[in-house]
Image (cartoon, grey):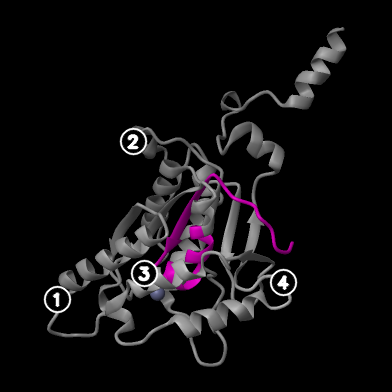
Amino acid sequence: MSSHRYTPERVLVIVAHPDDIEFGCAGTVARWVQDGAAARYVLCTSGQVGIKDPSISLDEAAAIREREQLAAAKMVGVDEVVFLRHQDGILENTIALRRELVREIRRFRPEVLITGDPTAFFVGDSYINHPDHRAAAAAALDAVFPAAGMPTLFKELEDEGLEAHETRKVYVMSWDSPDTWVDISETIDLKIAALREHTSQLGEWNPEERIRQWAAERAKGKEMAYAEAFRVITLKSDEDWARCKGYVQPERCAEPESEAAAVGEAAR
Ligand SMILES: [Zn+2]
């Protein structure tokens, strides 16, 4: 797969910390929202240990970073941000976290889920991927498939009116094995503006030049100026998605066009 202009109806992004989305995929989210998609963010932690000032309590730090994340989301047109408020810095891919993420997936019923790459330990030669990033990504992938789509797993969520949901596609933010590049030339300014909302992390640093450089590197040879790159897993066929929109129970699905036509054919 190469570049494309696909826009999902609903996109859910699951990450570990405030600012992960802005570094990774906010240009793509901004573009999809401009094209009419509904988007929601889920943050497993509130990034409170990312503020390294001992005079600021962890609770205050969490509040600061949540405010920054809400502002960053708003910048790209996303109004809904869910904070699961796990302890920052020691996030684990537990069954309890998986259940929480299944709840969010069944609640929002996304067409596309975006998350990180849990296999990424090393990024380039000067960065070791944060263990929270790996844990959040692994938990998100374990939640989206197969758990969220299994009606008898986490059945207690039915009490909240939530039904099983099969997501159409998963976009894994991929550093070294992308197969899909989303053109963010029209939204890179929004991505940078959203990132700049994280003032507690950036300090005096203006990230514009670095972000443009990275996005231009990703776009190289792709007939676009700036890109974000993903590895895309397609979990549901186009036909299944068109008929069932993520629902698992057959009675929730529309009659397949071709079958209805075939029945009409036979009856004649
Ligand atoms: Zn992070």
| Residue 202 coordinates in the image, percent (x, y) | 33, 82
Q: Nearer the viewer, mark 2 or mark 4?
A: 4
| Residue 79 coordinates in the image, percent (x, y) | 35, 52
Residue at which label 3 appears? 17
* Horizontal side, residue 54 vs residue 175: left or right: left
The Cα–Cα distance between marks 2 and 1, rounded to whole angstroms, is 34 Å
The Cα–Cα distance between marks 3 and 4, rounded to whole angstroms, is 30 Å
Q: Amino acid at mark 2?
A: Glu
| Labels 3 and 2 touching (C-beta < 8 A) | no
* Horizontal side, residue 44 vs residue 200: left or right: right
Residue at which label 4 appears? 222
Residue at which label 2 appears? 160
Pointer 4: residues within 10 angstroms few (<14), some, or many (20+)?
Answer: some
Q: Which is more N-terminal, label 4 or label 3? A: 3
- Res. 14 image quadrant: bottom left
Q: In the displayed structure, would residue 248 be above or below residue 141?
A: above
